[in-house]
Amino acid sequence: MYVCICNALRERTLSSAIQTLGQPTVGEVYKALGCKPQCGKCISDIASMLRALRQTQTAAAGSIE
């Protein structure tokens, strides 16, 4: 599914970049993919993806202890 239509960024591409970068900001994700937000409608979706990943990482870290 496309998350950012302006830059033709799919959810899979964004997820891969986010996981590779660790805990990036939205801007760092765009930079890593060689683009910039155009209309800005996808920024909240990407931020949600980042929050979900952080929650997953936090939950996983808690289960290790």
Image: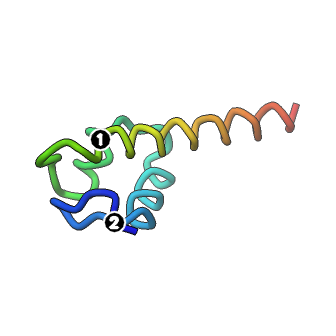
Q: Is residue 5 above or below residue 22?
A: below
> What SS does tag 1 mark?
helix
Quadrant of the snapshot with the C terminus: top right
Q: Which residue is mark 2?
A: 2
- Specify the farthest residue to the left: 38
> What SS does tag 2 mark?
strand
Give the distance between the C-alpha atoms of the residues marked 2 and 1, in whole angstroms. 13 Å
Residues packed near mark 2 inside 10 Å, few (<14), some (14 to 19) or many (20 plus): some
**Residue 30 or residue 37, whichever sits in front:** 37
Residue 7: image x %, image y %? 18, 61
At label 1, which amino acid type do we have? Ile
Quadrant of the snapshot with the N terminus: bottom left
Residue 17: image x %, image y %? 41, 57
Residue 39: image x %, image y %? 13, 46
Specify the color scheme: rainbow
Give me the disc on residue 43.
1
Give me the disc on residue 5.
none
Residue 4 relative to residue 10: left or right? left
The mark that comes first in sequence, 2 or 1, is 2
Q: Are marks 2 and 1 in contact (CB under 8 Å)?
A: no
At label 2, which amino acid type do we have? Tyr
- Specify the farthest residue to the front: 41
Q: Name the residue rendered at 15%, 48% in the picture.
A: 36
Q: Is residue 13 above or below residue 35?
A: below
**Looking at the image, how many numbered discs can be counted on the residues?**
2
Q: Name the residue rendered at 46%, 40% in the picture.
A: 48
Residue 19 relative to residue 60: left or right? left
